Image (tube, helix red, strand yellow):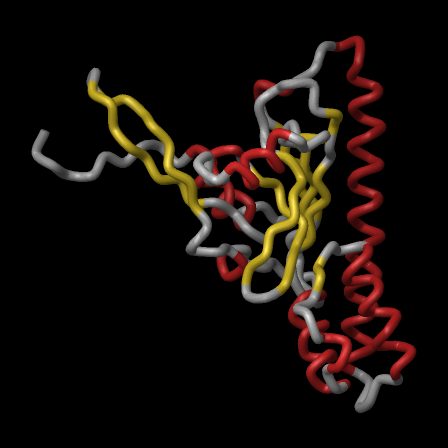
Amino acid sequence: EDGELVFRPGGHGALLKNLGSIDAPLVIIKNIDNICHDRVKEDTYYYKMVLAGYLVDLQDKAYSYLRGLDHSTQPSTKVISTMWAFMENKLNVIPPEGADSWNKDKKTKFLKEKLNRPIRVCGMVENEGEPGGGPFWVQRSGYRTLQIVESAQVNHDDPDQWRKLKEGTFFNPVDLVCYTKDLDEKPRSILPFVDPEAAFVTNKSYEGRDITGVLQMLLW
């Protein structure tokens, strides 16, 4: 009533600090409302191990490439091409147009920036009409990355954007595995990898009145 901002408990926004406080290289994230029935727990355990194993494999390769770059004064064209393909096909980071013509130094700098980051693997299931974010290509700063996009992030007044969202065939039921340690296996802060411009606006209620809320999104 006095016009001041209303702050609510952390919820999703507390996830970053909570991750930073966990002294473990690998963290599995799942929504409490996605806890499954006992009859399918074995399947759940199996696919958690699949996601975690795939993440460890990706992280090992990324760090191996980074160590190679740090110990090489001039990586060969073949080595750069191998890392470039890994970045595009496994980490789903697509460089800007014209990147093929960059010299080795510029390509090496870009590779170091994109490989030396926290990695997450997100489980996807077939979209059967359930609410949730889905995998879409997002373009920022000239390059594209594969991200989980929520419907609240999409401009509903843009027919093309809304069509793309509706035609998505998969969604993420909050099933993620994250690797949080850096190249030296030390704790890494995730906050530097957040996009401060990524957010969505949502409608909430407070003491019987409708209010507008803003939730900052996480972009790795």
Q: In the rendered image, which quarter is residue 187 located in? A: bottom right
Q: Which picture quadrant has residue 29?
A: top right
Q: Quadrant of the N terminus?
A: top left
Q: Residue at x 61, y 41 (%)?
A: 148
Relative to 44, 198 lies left or right: left
The quarter of the displayed image where residue 39 is located: top right
Is 112 positioned to the left or the right of 82 in the image? left
In the image, is residue 185 above or below residue 103? above
Toward the viewer: 65 or 41? 65
**Is residue 189 or residue 58 the one in the foreground?**
58
Left or right of residue 136, residue 18 in this image: left
- Relative image position of residue 5 (x, y in whole percent): 20, 39
> Residue 211 at what x, y percent from top left?
25, 28
Nearest to the observer: residue 60 or residue 173: 173
Q: Nearer the viewer, residue 99 or 8?
A: 99
Q: Which part of the image, by quadrant, shows the C terminus?
A: bottom right
Horizontal and vertical percent position of residue 26: 70, 46
Q: What residue is at 77 percent from the left and 72 percent from the top?
A: 66
- The residue at the point 55 percent across, 51 percent down is 219
Residue at figure coordinates x 71%, y 59% from the top left: 93
Spot occupied by residue 190 in the image (x, y as percentages of width and height): 54, 55
Q: Is residue 184 left or right of residue 198?
A: right
Disc tally is 0
**Residue that sits furthest to the bottom in the current view:** 73
Residue found farthest to the front:
159
Vertical placement of residue 3 versus 194, above or below: above
Q: Residue furthest right?
A: 78
